[in-house]
Image (cartoon, rainbow, N blue to C red):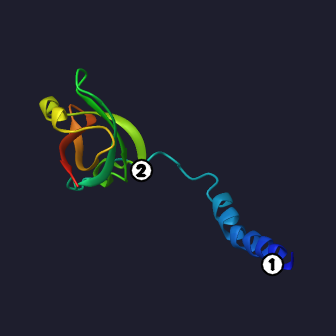
């Protein structure tokens, strides 16, 4: 029981600086970050769904630095629709994303 109280007290003190830091951001401009001008790099992902007819793939992916996107699960159009026939749901892939016609898209996808 004493260890639970100690852990609770430790977590309360550990969270305190984060609470103050969050409070000090009042009045700051909190616009979403714009995509950086970084070169597209492959990102680890897992195929969740393939819609070959629409030319889209739903991916659970890590952060995409060149698009300023965090890790999430999202559907993306695929530049080369025909390549979707070479993949199946549940596969681990390495994906390169970029803006195509002003929208995030898969420009290359390979098995890991």
Give coordinates of residue 51: x percent, y percent.
Answer: 28, 26
Q: Secondary structure at mark 2?
A: loop
Q: What residue sits 12% from the left and 30% below the top?
A: 82
Give coordinates of residue 3: x percent, y percent.
Answer: 81, 78
In the picture shown, does residue 33 fall above or below 53? below
Foreground residue among 71 and 82: 82
Check contact, mark 2 vs mark 1: CB within 8 A. no
Quarter of the picture containing the C terminus is: bottom left
Side of 12 where 82 appears, left or right: left
Q: How many marks?
A: 2
Q: Nearer the viewer, mark 2 or mark 1?
A: 1
Indicate which disc residue 72 carries. none
Give coordinates of residue 85: x percent, y percent.
Answer: 17, 32
Q: Which residue is mark 1?
A: 3
Q: Secondary structure at mark 1?
A: helix
Q: What residue sits 72% from the left and 69% below the top?
A: 16
Side of 47 where 79 appears, left or right: left
Side of 97 where 69 appears, left or right: right
Q: What residue sits 64% from the left and 53% below the top?
A: 26
Quarter of the picture containing the N terminus is: bottom right
Label 2 or label 1, whichever comes before in sequence order: 1
Indicate which disc residue 71 carries. 2
Give coordinates of residue 36: x percent, y percent.
Answer: 30, 52
Foreground residue among 96 and 69: 96
């Amino acid at each position: 029981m004493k260890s639970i109280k100690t852990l609770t007290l430790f977590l309360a003190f550990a969270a305190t600086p984060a609470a103050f830091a969050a409070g000090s951001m009042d009045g700051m401009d909190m616009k979403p970050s714009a995509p950086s001008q970084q070169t597209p790099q492959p990102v680890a992902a897992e195929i969740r769904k393939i819609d070959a007819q629409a030319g889209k793939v739903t991916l659970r992916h890590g952060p995409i630095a060149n698009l300023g996107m965090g890790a999430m699960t999202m559907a993306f159009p695929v530049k080369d629709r025909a390549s979707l026939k070479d993949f199946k749901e549940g596969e681990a892939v390495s994906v390169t994303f970029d803006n195509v016609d002003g929208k995030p898209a898969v420009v290359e996808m390979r098995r890991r």
